[in-house]
Image (cartoon, helix red, strand yellow):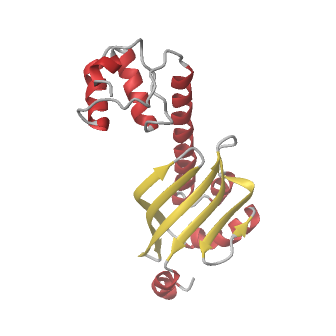
Amino acid sequence: MFPVAEYLAAKQPVLDPATLPVIVAVQVQERVRGNDRAFAVASLTQLFGPEGIPDGIPTLEDDRICHASNSRFRAVENSQATVRRWLDAVQDRDIDEVLDCFSPNGSWQNVPHPPAIGQDAIRAMLEPILARSEQVMWDIVTESYSSDRAWLERVDRFVIDGTEYAVRCNGVLEIDPGLGLITAVRDYVDLGEWRSRITAANL
């Protein structure tokens, strides 16, 4: 074990993102390089406890690991941007913009129904309710992202003829990080609950 202060006194330590949460690694590296060692010490102490740094976590002078950490962090930010663009398009009821968020062979599945595969099929599935709604609001309850996937706990709200219809949903999105496009959406919804709420809307 290495005391935290001693660990950070090494030559500009760069923390391996394989052994640390990437955001923690990036934050600590940035603060060390900015001479804010008090923050770095506090962060690592909170992560590892007062005993110090385990022997297995390397101290490296090579910037390649820092670049790898930053690259992974940017990839997560890019996936968040892709999802935000998709959510904004849905809430704007802009079906063309929604489809622009998908790869050509992308899919959208309301589990357990078979997926709508390809942009024409997604349009056929989604356009009727977007066109019928006066307002669409998808509230994000919790969310988590990686470079190529997003997990969203949502409450999907549709205002139709002045009445709001809401359904709880858990969505998983797969993202092509190179294209910045969605390749698959899987929404897990209680379809019985949803049907019971929209019967009066004649959908």
Q: Residue 119, position in %: x, y?
A: 73, 61
Q: Nearer the viewer, residue 2 or 71?
A: 2
* Rendering quarter of residue 179: top right
Q: Most extreme residue toward the top, as rendered? A: 11
Q: Nearer the viewer, residue 177 or 42?
A: 42
Q: Nearer the viewer, residue 23 or 82?
A: 23
Residue drawn 25% across the image and 29% down it: 42
Horizontal side of 8 relative to 181 (left or right) equals left
Horizontal side of 126 relative to 36 (left or right) equals right
Q: Quadrant of the N terminus?
A: top left
Count of marks overlaid on the render: 0
Q: Quadrant of the C terminus?
A: bottom right
Q: Most extreme residue toward the left, as rendered? A: 50
Residue drawn 55% across the image and 50% down it: 83
Q: Residue 156, position in %: x, y?
A: 46, 68
Q: Residue 112, position in %: x, y?
A: 61, 78
Q: Nearer the viewer, residue 147 or 66?
A: 66
Residue 178 vs 167, above or below: the answer is above
Residue drawn 56% across the image and 28% down it: 68
Residue drawn 64% across the image and 43% down it: 177
Q: Residue 108, position in %: x, y?
A: 65, 65
Residue 147 vs 87, above or below: the answer is above
